[in-house]
Amino acid sequence: MKFIDEAKILVKAGDGGDGCVSFRREKFVPRGGPNGGNGGRGGDIIFYADPNKASLLDYRYQRHLKAKRGGHGRGKDQHGASGESIRLPVPLGTEVWEASSQALLGDLDQNGRELVVARGGRGGRGNTHFKSSTRQAPRHAETGEPGEERTIRLELKLLADIGLVGLPNAGKSSLLRAVSAAHPKVADYPFTTKRPVLGVVGLSDERSFTVADLPGLIEGAHQGQGMGIQFLRHVERTRLLLHLVDLSTVKTEQVLAGFETIERELGEYDARLFNRPRLVVLSKIDLPAVQQNLKQAMQLFSDRHMKTLAVSSLTREGIDELLNRCWDILSQSEISDGK
């Protein structure tokens, strides 16, 4: 399925039904009086969080949504039916913004949470409502109010416990394949991952957490370079960052330069990410070139007081230690929603 994490749509709630002007006319009932009913309320437009949704793809092609209007009032004090509301499912983690004012209307980050983004118009009152001791035959009724209309921008920020970050081709997708049932694309060229991929890691004793493989970052990502800001938003909600470093393609003295580039881009995008728990993961340690540089690279990060582990997604060396360390950090973390 194509991954879409942004969409802009026009929503229009239903108009209220008109009130009715009517008088009771029956044999043997003189001066029956007014009996016009009220119009029904228009339908609302409601978004709700659905864990079965993984993308905003439906709204990329469905740009206009309109709820039904309320029924008109009728004689014999019959009120119009309320218009049917439209309930729209979105993935967990979807933020709803008003496009014109750039105001955040709501964050649907919990299963079943709802947000009314456009309210239906109130139905008009029939002439029965205007009857009084001094006005016994009112000949007017109200028209229904129009429903709210606005342009909405949907923005999905994935809800994951762990985010995999690093330079392109650092081994993020291979690691996700090794620890979960997810099947992201793996190849020997940069930018293989073009969309975030979620995987669920299951440990013993019913311990589990979710991991997001994010497209590789480059210098200038926070300004839109490479995959850029399009996917940086998905890092915001993660509770732990695994920063993967590939020692097979760079000299040892260049390792820190690439690492600091990614760290700088994360901080430029959102300063709060500086305080997010993180582990440095040296990947592809099954390769001879990596084995030669591994000890020196571990010392470089140790000197900077960075928690560092070395793994091989191919041989699974170090994988169990990594997963248990992740669980320990997540269990102790005070960050409950990644914000």
Image (cartoon, grey):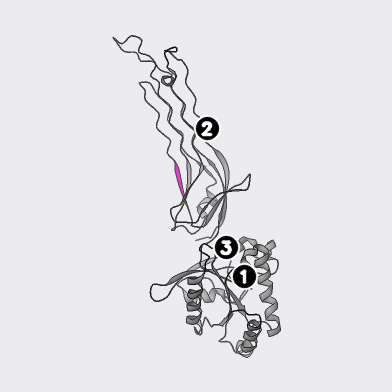
For numbered disc 1, what is the local secondary structure? loop
Q: Where 164 sits versus 127, above or below?
A: below
Mark number for residue 146?
2
Residue at 52% x, 35% y is: 147
Q: Quadrant of residue 276?
A: bottom right
Badge 2 or badge 1: first in the primary sequence: 2
Residue 51 image offset from top left, x and y in percent: 44, 58
Asked whether the residues under the numbered discs 2 and 3 touch, taking CB atoms below 8 Å apart as contact, a structural biologist would say no
Residue 290 image offset from top left, x and y in percent: 61, 86
Give me the C-alpha separation between circle 2 and circle 1: 47 Å
Q: Amino acid at mark 3?
A: His
Q: Where 185 sits versus 304, above or below?
A: above
Mark number for residue 201?
none
Mark number for residue 234?
3
Q: Where 109 sits versus 328, above or below?
A: above
Badge 1 or badge 3: first in the primary sequence: 1
Is label 1 or label 3 in front? 3
Judged left or right of residue 34, residue 109 is right
Q: Mark 1 highlights which residue?
A: 216
Tell me where the magenta segment starts and ends, as one range: 79-92
Q: Where 212 sits versus 82, above or below?
A: below
Tell me the crowding category of disc 2: few under 14, some 14 to 19, or many 20 or more residues within 10 angstroms, Cα based.
many
Q: Amino acid at mark 1?
A: Gly
Give me the C-alpha separation between circle 1 and circle 3: 13 Å
For numbered disc 3, what is the local secondary structure? helix
Q: Amino acid at mark 2?
A: Pro
Tell me the crowding category of disc 3: few under 14, some 14 to 19, or many 20 or more residues within 10 angstroms, Cα based.
many
